[in-house]
Image (tube, grey):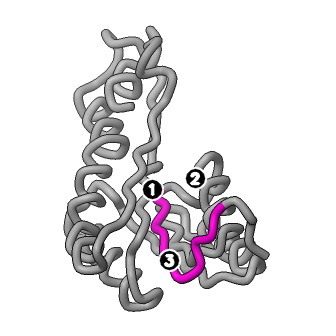
Amino acid sequence: MTTKLFDLKGKTAIVTGGNGGIGLGIARGLAEAGADVAVVGRNEDKSKAAVAELASRGVRAIAVATDVTDKEAVGRMVERVKGELGRVDILVNNAGINIRKPPHALELEEWSSVIDTNLTSAFLCSKAVHPAMKAAGGGKIINIGSMMSIFGASFAPAYAASK
């Protein structure tokens, strides 16, 4: 069943962090509109469950276990999506993590982990899908932010900076 507001039949979407929370909600909406969906996440069991739910909506859906902070892994993910679903029309950069510590207690490795997952991954995924979208005549890239980027928080400096 597709929604009357949007018709995405024939389109393929990649949703990073698409196996839970906001990402799964976005994946559901894309599937309801008729898009095939690649759920990208680190937790294979959650991704497989999400794919089963999405496929029940009458679209093709695949789970692609990927570390979105790894350039080569992201490249392989995009190639797999193109190979199995035929194209890439939409990228939703939703993957995100948070380490809740005040700035003075946050280690550099923790800062880097949050920045790489929340921000660098959006760059890597966007760059990787660009050739496919350009060849298809266009596409849409959606980056998910957070109100914390506006208001900040004493316990989440890296998250606020990355969103």
Q: Is residue 26 left or right of residue 109?
A: right
Q: Is residue 40 magenta?
A: no
Residue at mark 2 = 23
Residue 13 lies within the magenta run? yes
x and y, in percent, of residue 71 in the image: 21, 63
Given this view, does label 1 or label 3 mark the residue nearer the observer? Answer: 3
Q: What stretch is highlighted in magenta?
A: 6-16
Numbered circle sitting on residue 92: 1
Q: Which amino acid does label 1 sit on?
A: Val
Q: In this view, does 43 lie above or below 23?
A: below
Q: Earlier in the sequence, mark 2 or mark 3?
A: 3
The three-letter code of the residue at mark 2 reads Gly
On the image, the x and y values in percent for residue 11 come to: 50, 77
Point out residue 83 in the picture as x, y percentages from the top left corner.
Answer: 37, 90
**For this view, does 114 lie left or right of residue 47?**
left
Separation of residues labelled 2 and 3 (CA atoms): 18 Å
The answer for how far apart the CA atoms under marks 1 and 2 are is 8 Å
Q: Earlier in the sequence, mark 1 or mark 3?
A: 3
Residue in view at x 39 percent, y 67 percent = 66
Q: Which residue is drawn at 45% across and 35% down?
A: 145
The answer to whether mark 1 and mark 3 are in CB contact below 8 A is no
Residue drawn where x is 41% and y is 89% of the image: 86
Q: Does residue 115 appear to the left or right of 150 in the view shown?
A: left
The amino acid marked with disc number 3 is: Lys
Vertical placement of 146 versus 141: above or below? Answer: above
Question: At numbered mark 1, what does the secondary structure look like: helix, strand or loop?
Answer: strand
Q: Is mark 3 on a helix, strand or loop?
A: loop
Q: Which of marks 1 and 2 is nearer the N terminus?
A: 2
Mark 3 = which residue? 11
Foreground mark, 2 or 3, reads 3
